[in-house]
Amino acid sequence: KAGVTQTPRYLIKTRGQQVTLSCSPISGHRSVSWYQQTPGQGLQFLFEYFSETQRNKGNFPGRFSGRQFSNSRSEMNVSTLELGDSALYLCASSQGLSTYNEQFFGPGTRLTVL
Amino acid sequence: GQQLNQSPQSMFIQEGEDVSMNCTSSSIFNTWLWYKQDPGEGPVLLIALYKAGELTSNGRLTAQFGITRKDSFLNISASIPSDVGIYFCAGLFKGTYKYIFGTGTRLKVLA
């Protein structure tokens, strides 16, 4: 079974631009979560989607948004990029059910904002 | 954002030594996960725990779900150089699907 895939792996943007990151979950998984990882703040939860609906949301500004498609693939968008948005963005998938909540991560997208 | 207390923050050990790390929370979790992350990569799931008191092994790794449901422990026996990396715990509140992550333990193994 293929793992979680994320594209692109690396991205360089400038302040004020917007960016879209993509995540394909493990086949059969309906939940996709997004995290921001920085050296200073660790792994911070952005949001979680299940069956095309945002089910959980972290404490990030509205510039961070996401969506999930009917095939469970998910995209994350960051508008009006700031220098502080430079981070490793990780996507994780799980079945999303009340039991067997094992969550598997993709390799991440390294975003650099100049 | 919310995070679990994970300790130690970092540790240097000699190859062949055993390693212990733990995560504690003021809240009760119904699932604990342990991950290892190598530089520039995503975390890899090592062990999942679902019941208080549960003890689960994966090769040289053993993790336990604390009886109080507020803590979890990870032990690595006979460490080897490839054990180097950052280890994270993650807890899940009952009835939610939002994982809370520990601050990480950076492990360095001296050959």
Image (cartoon, coloured by chain):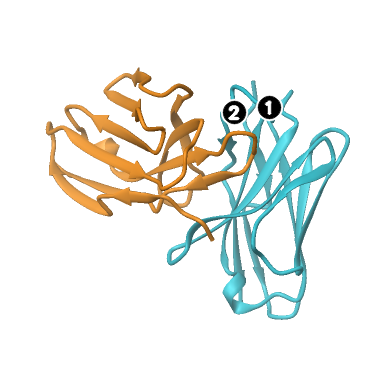
Q: Which chain is cyan?
A: A
State the mark number for residue A95: 1
In which quadrant of the rendered view does residue B51 lie?
Answer: top left
Q: Residue B47's x, y, as percent? A: 42, 27
Chain of residue at mark 2: A
Which is more toward the observer, A109 or B10?
A: B10
Q: Residue furthest right?
A: A70
Left or right of B87, for residue A82: right
> In the displayed structure, would residue A20 be above or below residue B30?
below
Q: Residue B56's x, y, as percent? A: 36, 19
| Quadrant of image for the C terminus of chain B | top left
State the mark number for residue A15: none
Residue with the mark numbered 2 = A101
Which is more toward the observer, A1 or B57?
A: B57
| Quadrant of image for the N terminus of chain B | bottom right
Question: Label 1 sits on what residue type?
Answer: Gln
Q: Residue A7's x, y, as percent? A: 69, 49
> In the displayed structure, would residue B51 be above or below residue B3?
above
Left or right of A87, for residue A97: right
Chain of residue at mark 1: A
Residue drawn at 33 percent across, 26 percent down: B64
Residue drawn at 21 percent across, 33 percent down: B80
> In the displayed structure, would residue A62 be above or below residue A103?
below
Q: Residue A97's x, y, as percent? A: 69, 26
Q: Earlier in the sequence, mark 1 or mark 2?
A: 1
Q: CA distance from mark 1 to mark 2?
A: 7 Å
Q: Residues within 10 Å of mark 2 (few under 14, many from 20)?
A: many
Q: Residues within 10 Å of mark 1 (few under 14, many from 20)?
A: many
What secondary structure is marked by label 2? loop
